[in-house]
Image: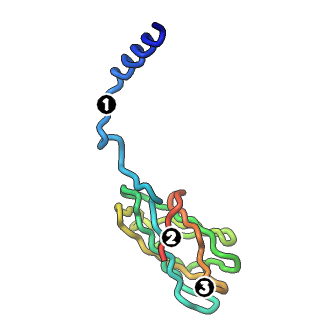
Amino acid sequence: MRGGIAALAAACVMALIPAVPASAAGPAVSAGEPCDISYRPTPGNEVFDVYLVIRNTSGYEINGWTLAFVLPPGQSFVRGSEYEVNISTADQAVDGWNKPWNGTVVDRGTVGLGFKVRGPNWQIEPTEFLINGKKCSVSP
């Protein structure tokens, strides 16, 4: 008897909760990482250029983005060399954020940016990138 009353009470509560259509539940989010990064260094001696592309794979539009990564040991960001991004650094840690004109990235859209790095071994690249605090996949 006790189990029947509990089941009836649960059914009554569920009947009071309105059904929410799947489309109203919010944007679909991909099963993988919400972003993909392509980090392309240009061969150089002590200073080399980096072209970085952020691809939005989240399933929804991004309105405002931040970028975070750590340069390999011995490498450092060259102040004043950045374009299409604002950058601040602490040792090898690099934090970037959008310019007023490139903060919106549609689903499957991209934004490109660049900067210079000082240090040996341009072939050694950062291994982890975060966009808005979420880990991105990295493409060659």
Residue under label 2: 138
The percent position of residue 121, horizontal first and vertical second, equals 64, 86
Q: Nearer the viewer, residue 13 or 63?
A: 13
Instruction: Measure the alpha-carbon separation of dots 2 and 1.
Output: 39 Å
Residue under label 1: 19
Q: Decide which of tag 1 and tag 3 comes sooner along the chain.
A: 1
Instruction: Measure the alpha-carbon separation of dots 2 and 3.
Output: 17 Å
The percent position of residue 31, horizontal first and vertical second, equals 43, 55
Q: Decide which of tag 2 and tag 1 comes sooner along the chain.
A: 1
Q: Amino acid at mark 3?
A: Trp
Q: Decide which of tag 2 and tag 3 comes sooner along the chain.
A: 3
Where 49 falls versus 129 (above or below)? below
Q: Is residue 88 visible?
A: no
Q: Is residue 45 shown left or right of residue 22?
A: right
Residue under label 3: 122
Where 25 falls versus 86 (above or below)? above
Label placed on residue 93: none
Q: Is residue 87 shown left or right of residue 64?
A: right
Residue at 64 percent of width and 90 percent of height: 46
- Mark 1 or mark 3, whichever is nearer to me: 1
Few, some or many residues within 10 Å of mark 1 (<14, 14–19, 20+): few
Residue at 60 percent of width and 85 percent of height: 122
Q: Are marks 1 and 3 in contact (CB under 8 Å)?
A: no
Q: Amino acid at mark 2?
A: Val
Q: Amino acid at mark 1?
A: Ala
